Amino acid sequence: MDKKGHLIVISGFSGVGKGTVVKNLVDKYGYSLSISATTRAPREGEVDGREYYFKSVADFQNLIDYNGFIEWAQYVDNYYGTPRKFVETEMAEGRDVILEIEVQGAMNVKRQYPDAILIFIAAPNAEVLKERLAGRGTETEEVINKRMKRAAEESHDIDEYDYIVVNDDLDQCVQDVNSIIVCKKCMRENNLSFIEDIKRELQMK
């Protein structure tokens, strides 16, 4: 198999459970997770450097100026970005890296890394999505409505993704996403070096 790691972009509507899906993928299958930077305030239980790197707007903008992000975007009054150095180091060392990012950021990654695997996590329907947002208990009705409006906007870009996975049952969703990644890694075009190596080795026997 070719040794360079793969870049996996996972997006989804706010409240769809993509964070839980990603956590399970990392825990069960050993993927590397790129930790995003954000200017939003930590939620209860979140730790700087674990869920996010929590930064001031000034610090975030400074990193933008120094090309420190693969992508960044503004989402519901806050900035989010993917630190460049970690991702490129992990991939160079042969590890598969998951980016959990918003649609706008995913489109930027796709332009820079055409071989990235883009996966969109969806809820079974809009009503379930709103129920999950309300069930968090962390957002006001106004913020929930903002997130639903944003989801409607994001839905226009779903067809830019390679794969769509519905998060109806968590375990099945995690298994489906992992299967997609494994299948993509096994495709011929992702194993050209291996093919040449095995041909050469067999000719020498």
Image: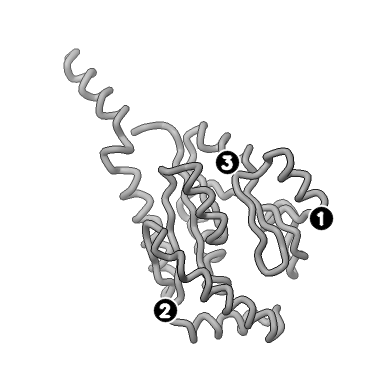
Q: Residue at x 44, y 42 (%)?
A: 6
- The Cα atoms of the two marked residues, 2 and 3, are separated by 31 Å
Which amino acid type is marked by label 2?
A: Pro
Q: Residue at x 51, y 69 (%)?
A: 154
Residue 150 placement, left or right of 142:
left
Q: Quadrant where the N terminus lies?
A: top left
Which of 157 and 181 lies nearest the eye of the viewer? 157
Give coordinates of residue 144: x percent, y percent: 64, 81
Taking 131 as reference, is 98 above or below it? above
Residue 78 on image: x %, y %? 72, 63
Answer left or right for 56 relative to 193.
Answer: right
Vertical side of 38 occupied by 63: above or below: above
Say whether disc 1 or disc 2 marks the residue closer to the N-terminus: 1
Label for residue 124? 2
Give SS at disc 1: loop
Q: Which residue is mark 3?
A: 87
Q: Nearer the viewer, mark 1 or mark 2?
A: 1
Residue 115 horizontal/vertical position (percent): 41, 43
Q: Residue 134 occupies which quadrant of the picture?
A: bottom right
Residue occupied by mark 1: 56
